[in-house]
Image: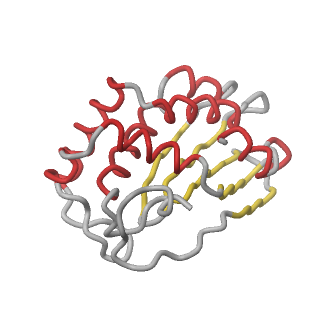
Amino acid sequence: NVVDGLAGSPVDSPAVYSGGESRTERDGDTYVALAFEGVPRGHQHAAAQQVLKHVVRQVVLAPTVASGVAKNGEAHAVPYSDSGLIGVLIRAGGPGSDAVGALAQAFRQVRSVDPAAFSSALNAAITEASTESTSFAQGAAHPSPDSIRAVTHEEVRALADATLRSNLTLVVDGNVEAVPNPRDVQAVFT
């Protein structure tokens, strides 16, 4: 698991994260959520996870990725980081949309975390931390701006690699036929 792959002890014992799948067939737009195991609240890499969330945001919202997701429509992507999860929710476009392929391309870039993306994500995470006093999950404290400033490029790269090797949760709402099974999706990230 991600916690075992990184140095640092969590405050609480982490739950076992095994990934999973949920599919709901319906007409209309298709929504795809990909979630990976993140670090638990209180972990020494919680600040790095906030930076990684912003790296994901930058990469997923890049024009080349967004156009692959959208094809015949508009792509909306919402990267998120919660206590124990990190991932992205997208609304795929029309029938020609390759949401998973575009996200695979994006996450390959996330794994490499180039210095420019790191610097920009670090600044975004510091700004976010400066404006939020608490996080969303179970009252977990949001990492402080100072703890985020201390995050290194290598720490985020290691976290990205460990995260993308963790078990995947895949949620599809809409055209379930358009999205491969979780094992095939997971293979793209490992």
Q: Quadrant of residue 73?
A: top right
Q: Position of residue 134 (x, y in %)?
A: 24, 67
Residue at 57%, 31% in the rendered image: 108
**Furthest residue toward top:** 64
Q: In the image, is residue 134 above or below residue 28?
A: below
* Residue at the image point whose x is 22% and y is 49% from the top: 148
Q: Which quadrant of the figure contains the C terminus?
A: top right
| Farthest-out residue, right | 177
14 sits to left or right of 103: left
Seen at 26% across and 62% down, the residue is 142
In this view, 138 is above or below 125: below
Query: Residue 59: x percent and y percent?
Result: 47, 31
User: What residue sits 65% from the left and 55% below the top?
Assistant: 168
For this rendering, which residue is in front, 66 or 40?
40
Q: Image check: 31 left or right of 153? A: right
Residue 9's place in the image compared with 25, above or below, is: below
Q: Position of residue 64 (x, y in %)?
A: 56, 20
Give the total number of marks visible in the rendering. 0
Q: Nearer the viewer, residue 90 or 72?
A: 90
Assign the N terminus to one quadrant of the image. bottom right
Q: How is the image coloured?
A: secondary structure
Residue 55 image point, x, y percent? 40, 37
